[in-house]
Image: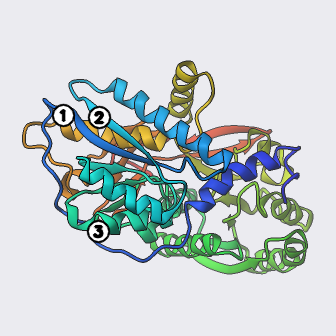
Amino acid sequence: MTGMVRGAGRIAARILAVFALIWLAACETTGVTASGPRVDASKPVPVALLVPAGSGEASDQVLAQSLENAARLAMADLSGVTIDLRVYSTGGSAENAAALAQQAVNEGARIILGPVFASEASAVGAAVRGRNVNVLSFSNNTAVAGGNVFVLGNTFENTARRIVGYARSQGITTALIAYGQDAAETRGRDVIAAAMAANGITLAGSNAVELSQMGVVNAVPEIAEQIKSTGAQAVFMTSGTAGALPILSQLLRENGIDRAETRFIGLQRWDIPASAVDLPGLQDGWFAQPDPALSAQFASRYTAAYGEPPHPIAGLAYDGIAAIGALVSSGSGATLGGASLTQSSGFVGVNGVFRLLPDGTNERALSMAQISDRQVIVIDPAPRSFGGAGL
């Protein structure tokens, strides 16, 4: 499927591979730990940052440096709070990450920021679970959330709530799901179906697509026929631009699915890489994204500071430091426990407001976007606080 996006497919594959790896299998955890260490704003707060450097993969090294840079950018923005950031390179290994987490706590860390991959996050959480220390992982895999582990990454559940809720507000009452045959996209199918049920949208069908060019070609006629026979007003697609999405969306249009009658809606970002917006099959389609103005502001500041743009998930490290700083600055009785981390008002991050939930997952404010004439247009802005539309 790569190469469908005007030569940018390899770039998209590298970017989206990180998001896929964040979903590595991990043990199921539920509930959140209410405890956590007290902190004193008058003293530097030791924070351990676990990054995937040392794996031998150049992409992991770039990601590690970008996460550290973003964390330090956030530290510079804090007022009245000093963070003692201690960086540990896990090599992308769960075993290494667990050992380093224990070392970090022995060396005084009051909270752990990172690691990236779900298998690492699960191992780290288990390693320090009895040490009264919480973990703010960069993962987006809700299977590792709970206990003392929180996930900072934007989750499929969060995105599904946003795209399905918006679709319902626009009068869509029946829709079909097309999903790739792998663990992540199957999970995407499940959370979209749950959001549809919660919003009163009828599921017209759920169609698996083998993740190969021939698999997509073979699946399209049946999907197109089901859309026509059920009158589905929308198709929710779980694949991204480095997967089945480019050819799936194009072939459905070529099989008679009219964009004026059936809206295509994406669970993943459709603007990465930027050239993806040229894809004919995605025109007039919807997807969710962080507030683009805030994202651009962060990218500009980061580039000015470090001479290159940030990695797509670098902002999670900034958000983690921002949340820690906000809690530390709240007073002499401040803690970094679960009850504080899950305050209902949430925190302000570089991509908008977010909050951590008692089950270790999160809510993030997202805007709804439409691709129109090969441009991304915001059609419903991201909320600026919790309790508003879209959250």
First in sequence: mark 2 or mark 1?
2
Instruction: State which quadrant residue 274 falls in.
Output: top right
First in sequence: mark 1 or mark 3?
3
Residue 50 vertical placement versus 84 (above, below)? below
Which-is-in-front pick, marks 2 and 3? Answer: 2
Mark 2 → mark 3, Cα distance in angstroms = 25 Å
**Where does the image place residue 136, in percent across and percent down from the top left?**
36, 53
Mark 1 → mark 3, Cα distance in angstroms = 25 Å
Q: Amino acid at mark 1?
A: Ser
Q: Residue at x 44, y 59 (%)?
A: 97
Which-is-in-front pick, marks 2 and 1? Answer: 2
Do the numbered discs 2 and 1 sit on residues whose CB atoms are within 8 Å? no
Q: Would residue 284 be seen by someone viewing this image from the given angle?
A: no
Residue that badge 3 annotates? 147
Q: Amino acid at mark 2?
A: Asp
Helix, strand or loop at disc 1? loop
Residue that badge 1 annotates? 329
**Where does the image place residue 48, in percent across and percent down from the top left?**
34, 46
Callout 2 crowding tier (Cα within 10 Å): few <14, some 14–19, many ≥20: some
Q: Would residue 261 be seen by someone viewing this image from the given angle?
A: yes
Residue that badge 2 annotates? 84
Q: Amino acid at mark 3?
A: Gly
Mark 2 → mark 1, Cα distance in angstroms = 15 Å
> From the image, which quarter does the N terminus lie in?
bottom right
Q: Nearer the viewer, residue 308 or 191?
A: 308
Q: Nearer the viewer, residue 359 or 109?
A: 109
**Where does the image place residue 331, in percent across and percent down from the top left?**
10, 36
Do the numbered discs 2 and 3 sit on residues whose CB atoms are within 8 Å? no
Q: Residue at x 16, y 52 (%)?
A: 37
Q: Is residue 357 left or right of residue 380?
A: left
Residue 290 vertical placement versus 19 (above, below)? above
First in sequence: mark 2 or mark 3?
2
